[in-house]
Image (tube, rainbow, N blue to C red):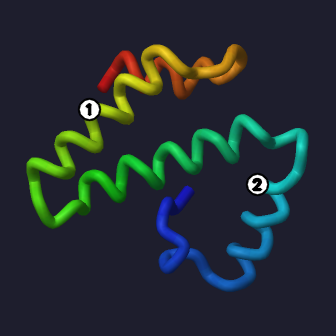
Amino acid sequence: MPTRRSLVTPARAECLDEVLTAGEHVAAAVTWDFYREIVAADDEPVRRAGKKRMVKLVKQTRTGVAQGLTTLATLGWTL
């Protein structure tokens, strides 16, 4: 799934919005937002700021992931 809105066609963007706003897909929405944050941290023009942002994201996934988001929690431990 592309993590940047600019990479998604308008038709796919509409479909993506439907999925991410549906109550039964909360886990997908949370995970997608997390991946967007990772990409943004990686694209940070100042390396030190990007690294600081990434460390914060990793800490959040290790400690603040809701039950049921096992894929996201596993990613936090992998990073």
Q: Mark 1 to mark 2: distance in Å?
A: 26 Å
Up the image or down, 74 lies above or below 8; here it is above
Up the image or down, 15 lies above or below 20; here it is below
Residue type at the position of mark 1: Val
Up the image or down, 67 lies above or below 21; here it is above
Question: Which of the numbered marks, if any, corresponds to residue 69?
Answer: none
* Image quadrant occupied by the N terminus: bottom right
Dot 1 or dot 2: first in sequence order is 2
Q: Is residue 41 left or right of residue 7?
A: left
- Extreme bottom residue here? 10
Q: Residues within 10 Å of mark 2 (few under 14, many from 20)?
A: some
Percent coordinates x, y for residue 22 in the rendering: 88, 51
Identify residue for label 1. Answer: 55
Q: Is residue 39 left or right of residue 48?
A: right
Of residue 3 and residue 51, the one placed in the foreground of this image is 51
Up the image or down, 57 lies above or below 12; here it is above
Residue that appears at 36% across and 55% down:
39
Of residue 24 and residue 1, the one placed in the foreground of this image is 24
Percent coordinates x, y for residue 16 in the rendering: 73, 64
Q: Residues within 10 Å of mark 1 (few under 14, many from 20)?
A: few
Residue that appears at 68% across and 85% down:
10
Dot 2: element: helix
